[in-house]
Amino acid sequence: MKQGIHPDYHHVVFRDRGADFAFLTRSTVTSAETVEWEDGRTYPVIDVQISSASHPFWTGKSRVLDDEGRVAKFYKKYGKAPKEG
């Protein structure tokens, strides 16, 4: 490998606050926020919105976010748009 062209590769904690789940891995991403890990060391922490602990594919729990479409919700709330012509 060529020296001096690669980003710093270090330990980072990725944390999914919604699922109360965190894991330690290596990455080039960094953060000013830190957290003390189970081994007693302090690592940068990156908060993520979804992880294997909260993703429906991995948990087997599907969530229905939108029963009716967005357009149908709009029409229900505000009524149908006037027809042109």
Image (tube, grey):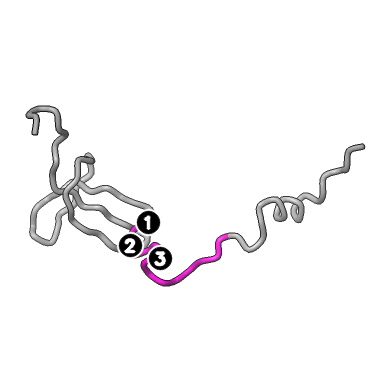
Which residue occupies the foreground of this view, 22 or 27?
A: 27
Callout 3: few (<14), some (14-19), or many (20+) C-alpha neighbours within 10 Å?
few
The kind of residue tagged 1 is Ile
**From the viewer's perspective, is the residue at label 3 or at label 2 nearer?**
3
The kind of residue tagged 2 is Ser
Which residue lies most toward the right here?
85
Which residue lies most toward the top here?
4
Which range is magenta?
Answer: 50-65
- Indicate left or right for 31 with 70 as reference: left
- Where disc 2 sits, the SS reads loop
For residue 56, above or below residue 4: below
Give the labeled residue for mark 1. 50
Which residue lies most toward the front here?
1
- x, y percent for residue 60: 41, 72
Give the labeled residue for mark 3. 57
Query: Distance between the Cα atoms at labels 3 and 1?
Result: 11 Å
Residue in view at x 76 percent, y 56 percent: 76
Query: Distance between the Cα atoms at labels 2 and 1?
Result: 7 Å
Residue in view at x 66 percent, y 52 percent: 70
Q: Which of the 4 quarters of the picture holds residue 31?
A: top left
- x, y percent for residue 19: 35, 64
- Label of residue 52 in the image: 2
- Label of residue 72 in the image: none
The kind of residue tagged 3 is Phe
